[in-house]
Image (cartoon, rainbow, N blue to C red):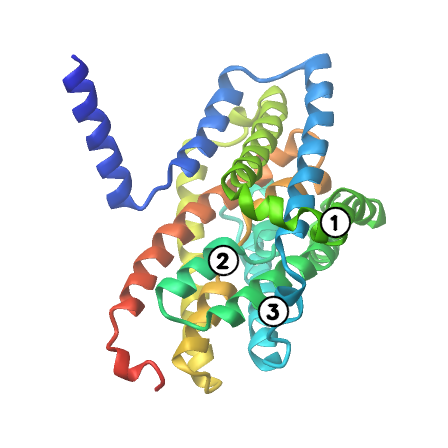
Amino acid sequence: MPGGTRILSMGFKSLLDKLKIEPYVIALFGMVVLASVLPVRGAAAEGLSVIVKLAIALLFFLHGAKLSREAVVAGVTHWRLHLTILAFTFVMFPVLGLVASKLGVLSSTLAAGMLFLCCLPSTVQSSIAFTSIARGNVAAAVCAASASNLFGIFITPVLVSVLMHTQGGAAGGWESIQDIIVQLLLPFILGQLARPLVAKWVEKHKQLVGYVDRGSILLVVYAAFSEAVVGGIWSKVSALEMVVLLVACCILLAIVLAATTYGARALGFSKEDEITIMFCGSKKSMATGVPMAGILFPGPTAGVIVLPLMIFHQIQLMACSVIAQHYAKRPSEIVEA
């Protein structure tokens, strides 16, 4: 039996490797299952809400502490590349999200989730990692991804407020922006200010910081889906809608990947910059999106709102992993072409 269990475990790990699915992604969907079976209710839910707010504050404090001042100001001279990435992230994506939300193929809440997804900033870690694997402009990727997240703290709630208002949604408004400032921006600034004191500790305990980072997101997902389950989420989202959502996310990513790649070429960027633009301009951050959804969409709505983000996040990781390997195999002699 132990031998059979070990073989089964190895086979499962091999399957995950082939499908490019991270154990963390499995854990995320595990939180959805756990919340569906054992949702937190009543006084316990109120206590969890306080813990979640503290976890989010700690998460963004660590983001501020990890990001060096040099990374914040580096690459500013390459303004053309950064403006291009920001345009894809905060202009083209929201336009596509608005179009998708008006097609009528998704329920109003899932359509709102697609629109919210399109308003989010880019990822940081995976954008930089894929750019590095593909032999792109890593320095520019660090700056662009960091700038996207920094600006996203301000831009995303404004976009959500404007676009959701056009959709008849209740999200956004000055109160939501204030909550974003208090729960996300303020801890980030405090992290930056505390960096001289904590930077060495953070660098030394990278693995622990990583656990706190991912653990915070898992906690937020569990809390959001618990509230959604209590509010009857699974009576509102059918299996067919989930399939349609999956297809919609695939189409959205395909359009953006094509637009960033061919757009970068049309604008005359080098191959390294093209890689940076594609990876930084096509991804959306779960680390920022999940906590922000809990602030902008209080109540059971948040659990449904983050469904498109969770699905898109996994698809983008799988697709970009394959693309990065493809770029990495190109001959070295044409890197500067």
Image coordinates of residue 126 in percent, x first then y, are: 46, 55
- The reply to whether residue 289 is visible in this rendering is no
Badge number at residue 86: 3
Q: Say which residue appears at 63% left-offset and 36% top-offset.
A: 302
Q: Are marks 2 and 3 in contact (CB under 8 Å)?
A: no
Q: Nearer the viewer, mark 1 or mark 3?
A: 1
Which residue is labeled 2 in the image? 283
Which residue is labeled 1 in the image? 194
Badge number at residue 327: none
- The reply to whether residue 317 is visible in this rendering is yes
Image coordinates of residue 235 in percent, x first then y, are: 53, 24
Tell me the crowding category of disc 2: few under 14, some 14 to 19, or many 20 or more residues within 10 angstroms, Cα based.
Answer: many
Determine whether, in the image, residue 46 is placed left or right of residue 175.
Answer: left
Q: Say which residue appears at 57% left-offset and 51% top-offset.
A: 117
Q: Nearer the viewer, mark 1 or mark 2?
A: 1
Quadrant location of residue 82?
Answer: bottom right
